[in-house]
Amino acid sequence: MKQFLRITILFILPFTVSISISAQEENLYEMDLESLMEIEIVSASKKAEDIFEAPLGASVLSSEQIKESGATSIMEALRLIPGLIVRETTPGNYDIHLRGYDGVDPKGLITLTANTMTLIMVNNRTVYSEFQGQTYWELLQINIDDVDRIEVVRGPVSAMYGPNAVAGVINILTRSPTEKEGASFSTYSMAGAPNSVITSTSAAFNFDNGLGIRLSGNADFRDRHKVDYFIFNENDFVDELDETEVTNILGLHVLDADKPYEGVYLAGPQAGQPIPNYNIHERYPDKKLATERYGGNMHMRYNKNDLDLNLMGGYSYARVQRVYANNNIAALSTDSLNTYFAHFWGSYKGLTITADYSKGFNALVGSGELLKVNSDVLTATAEYDLKISENFSLKPGVSYKTSSYNSMGLGSTEQEIDPATFLSEGYEIVTPEDGGDVTNTLLSGHLQADYKWDRLRIIGAARVDKFQHPNKAAFSPLISATYKATENFLIRGSYGRSSRTPFIFDLFFDINLRYPTGTQYQGFALYNNLVYRGTERSDEIPGVNKNYDYKLLTVDDAEIGFRHKISETFTLDIELFWSQLNNLIALSKVGNDTIAGVNPLTGDETREAIEYYSFINLDMKPQQTGATMSLTSVPFKKMSFQIFVTVQQTKINDYADAIDVNGNPIDADGDGKKRSDFYHKATPAFTGGVNMNYRPTKKINFNLNSYFYSHQTLVINNEMNQGVVDANIILNGTINYKITDGIKIFATGRNLIGGYKRQYAFTDKIGPSVLGGVNINF
């Protein structure tokens, strides 16, 4: 039945709208090199300019380039952009970083390897989550057919875009409802093996009075190519994930799916005692599932004279297997998520206003209430473009943001387990003392100046962000300059400091582990893990440092770049960069305690050890040095190609072997050293790609694109788990055939020579895929 629904979505959706054919499309691949260099970008300086003139490292990827490449999602299409590290974790799900800094703490949890330093936006609306500081790519309400272009700015630009633009910005700009006259319809849909169905479809109407409306929908269903799971305690992959297998590996465990996942442990297997379980069927209801997602949008636009108003809203749902949070069993979790949003933006002459509201829900399936999260986020921004003279302009602005989250893990939640009741009935008693509502607000002011004198251009920006939690302000400056030595050669340089938003998880989530050492049953020790988070924070617990000062993560970055139109057929773009992270945050033990108790089974006195864990700043200073080179060529009218590569080295300085309860480094291994320096290997030393397009006739187009990365090693969980990813070359090929104006069919092969390799540590082997589809644009 599910497969029937997938096929129905793909083949019926494109024909549910009556259409009139009036297709006209500009072919990007028939442009000469000069035209390619004149493609506009807005995100690099918040004003429209040729990509060649951009003051920062920047790239633009058009909708046509994405579709001609045969990309199956927006995430995969990012492999066509220099400087991005894009690794598929399970089919359709990706780990995406800009330049690197992934998993820099070898003692950290796998949760902390996610990208928390790149700001992702859709039409300048932030889709970055502040709960744990990452982007839920599977919850994007849009898909490829919605995209007009993707703009990427590399380097810290918090001064222009606010916190979290630490490594840069990815801004996805969608198609306008008024881009064509009258009625229009489009779809980009495909299906193929292994068991994949993907569709992105829209219909729009332009009323010719400045008003237009566009409706779109998308769906994405994919199965895993090979089913296996990395078990942390086993430090290896297993092919079968069921109660028997997990119990044999981890020991006996009781879990109620409707309660927090921290449960009751028995120290060893007990013959003939089958009552404990890990809820495997609830945690992993469909082990073959990789991606199940769908979404829909409505966009209304009124554009007349100097007035431009937009209102957009949408909903998305996703059920995926991906790396998200430690679940005490495997690296992959099944996540169920949904979100909806409303977004208004408009401009009148020099004034720009934007406001948006989003509401979401996110849960680890089968893992109880502790990791279920509800969110409400409201943002408003106003800017004014003040033109002082022909060569000088100012852009002041203010913004406000409030983020509210609700999760049992954020409330005063204590698990109380009566061992006698457990052994007879097998359940937990959970007492939440409050609902776990947490709100953080942000008030910001910023100013940007743009001055041009002859061949020299200088852009300066500064921003102050005042947070409610912690009660402090962050200052983010940026200075950039370009010098156009000739019409064909431009030099640029920049320095910036960016700060990252304090995450709700970091600020309000503490873990206190309680180990009753004297509770015995039939010779086996009974362990009760207690998870507690209340109005007491760990820094308020007796014996723990009360003077702890939460510092915001910042990055300092300096860059030099060159753009050179070598000839009428070649252009070269080189950027050299250096950056350093400060105030990295990690989950660390901050206190110890013991309490007296009574064994409810025997009445004997017991002692319990308690360990307090909290997120604190580390003194380590990761530094990255690297370069990105991009060569673009149009050797003749029917052919174009781009080759790009990024080379980087990341060094971790002043890494503490361990820290005491006050955050001070200690000598843990007895070598006389409290700190050490080492090179970070989780970020590949080099990544890059090739994108070649050839159109022998007006009806046929061939595209060959490749993405490659070097060997990498990710170390997590107090260095207990190490994932090695081999170097890989991913090759994709696509052939498009134009049946008539506005109708194309295509066939694409993905990962044709990469083999069944894991692209990211502890995740799936990704094999080749073959798909066929239609690209309609009326």
Image (spheres, rainbow, N blue to C red):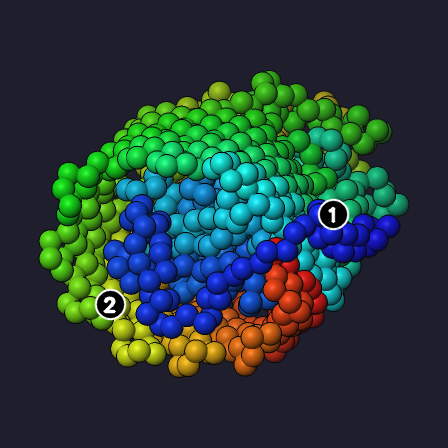
**Residue 735 coordinates in the image, percent (x, y):** 62, 74
Residue type at mark 2? Phe
Looking at the rendered structure, which numbered label has been put on residue 562? 2
Left or right of residue 262, residue 601 in this image = right
Nearer to me, 623 or 165:
165
Task: Identify residue for label 1.
Answer: 16
| Rendered residue at 49%/36% (across/down) | 209
Farthest left residue?
A: 454
Residue type at mark 1? Thr
Quadrant housing residue 204: top right
| Rendered residue at 86%/50% (across/down) | 1
| Rendered residue at 48%/73% (across/down) | 691
Mark 2 surroundings within 10 Å by alpha-carbon count, few (fewer than 14), some (14 through 19), many (20 or more) = many
Nearer to me, 170 or 675:
170
N-terminal label among 2 and 1: 1
Depicted 602 relative to depicted 193: above or below: above
